[in-house]
Structure formats: C-alpha cells, structure tokens
Amino acid sequence: MADIFTTSKRSQLMASIRSQGNLSTEQRMLSILRANKMRGWRRHIRLTLRGPNPPVQHGHLRPDFVWKRERLALFLDGCFWHGCRRHGHIPLTRSAFWSAKLERNMERDRAVSRALRKAGWTVVRIWEHDLKDEANTVHKMFKAFARTARNRSVRSNQHRRVSCSSDP
Ligand SMILES: [Zn+2]
C-alpha cells in the first residue's frame, strides 16, 4: 500500500498523536493521584543515568511522575506507542516502519526500567488502559511505594548512578 503522507507530514502527525496521548493519560493519572491524596510527586523532572552505554541518549529520561525522595519513577505507557498486546496495533500503511519503531520503543522501555532498577529506583509502568480502572491503579501505586523502602535499604550504594534535575 502506498504511503499517503510525506515524511514531514508524517512526523507532524506522529508528534500530535504523541502529545495528545500524553495529555490524556497524564491528566487521568493526576486526577487519580489527587483523589487518593497521593502527594510528593513532581512532573517533568529529568533523570540522568550515569555510566557507559545508557539505553537512551545521554542517559536522559523524563518519567511522567517522579517521587524523588522515594526514588520512584512512574511511566504512563500509551497502548499504541508502547505496544500494548491488547490494544496496540501495527498500522497497515508502512507496516515495516511501524513494526520496527514500536519494537524499538518496547526494547527501550525494558532497558530503561532495568537501568533504573539497577540503580536502586522503583519503576512503575501503568498502561493507558489501566487508568480506566482506578482501584487497580491505586493498588499498583501502593505496592510500588511498599517496594521503595526495601529498594532503598538494599541498594543505597547505587544511588549515585542516577541524578535528578528539574527543568529551568
Ligand atoms: Zn492497552
């Protein structure tokens, strides 16, 4: 099937899908956090993974929500961009391109989670579709907070491997 978009049109389209997705999942998570009185989070904090061969460029990451003191990073994974098995799909147009791209996204997600955990962080990934079930999302967050204390004591010597910085 012929590609109906030019390259620049396609990247515009991709950018708009990405930002729309982030907005709605972030807003939903915000309202769940507020309704359940979960505080102490920051948004748009940049974490930097130290050490050779970071899974992302310059080791820079931006989780959707960060609890700095607890060293907990929350990622909201959109069903399309992060390859949800239930709701994700490979577009029919340019399917090889999309399949490779989504595969890279998923591999990067796994590598980022691994690197953060290795550095003593607790990582929670919540699917876009999970946000429809508030009780389940809250349960996941409580379980994650329970893990933070354990991770802190076990891996306290690893903390220097991630640094935080806020946006100017
Ligand atoms: Zn899904």
Image (cartoon, rainbow, N blue to C red):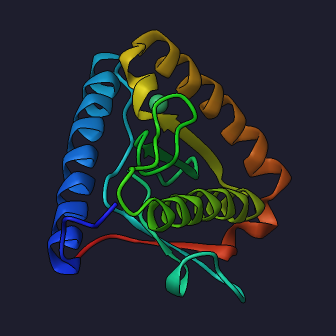
The reply, left or right, for residue 73 in relation to residue 110 is left
Q: Is residue 146 above or below residue 163?
A: above
Q: Residue at x 62, y 63 (%)?
A: 112
Place of residue 54 in the rendered image (x, y in percent of width and height, measured from the top left) = 65, 80
Q: Residue furthest right?
A: 154
Please state, as top left, top right, bottom left or bottom right, where the N terminus lies in the image: bottom left
- For the point 43% across and 42% down, the residue is 76
Give the left or right position of residue 17, taking residue 68 as reference: left
Provide residue 55's location: percent of width, then percent of height: 63, 75
Q: Quadrant of residue 107?
A: bottom right
Q: Is residue 150 above or below residue 3?
A: above
Where 95 sits versus 8, above or below? above
Q: Quadrant of the C terminus?
A: bottom left
Q: Is 92 in front, or is 44?
A: 92
Looking at this view, is 30 or 71 the one in front? 30
Left of 53 or right of it: where is 87? left
Q: What residue sits 77% from the left and 68% below the top?
A: 158
Q: Where is residue 159, by image quadrant? A: bottom right
Height in image: 131 above or below 154? above
For the image, the number of numbered tags is 0
Q: Residue at x 19, y 47 (%)?
A: 20
- Position in image of residue 110 (x %, y %): 67, 57
Which quadrant of the figure has residue 113? bottom right
Seen as rendered, the residue at the extreme top is 135
Q: Residue 90 in the image: state x and y as whole percent.
A: 46, 48
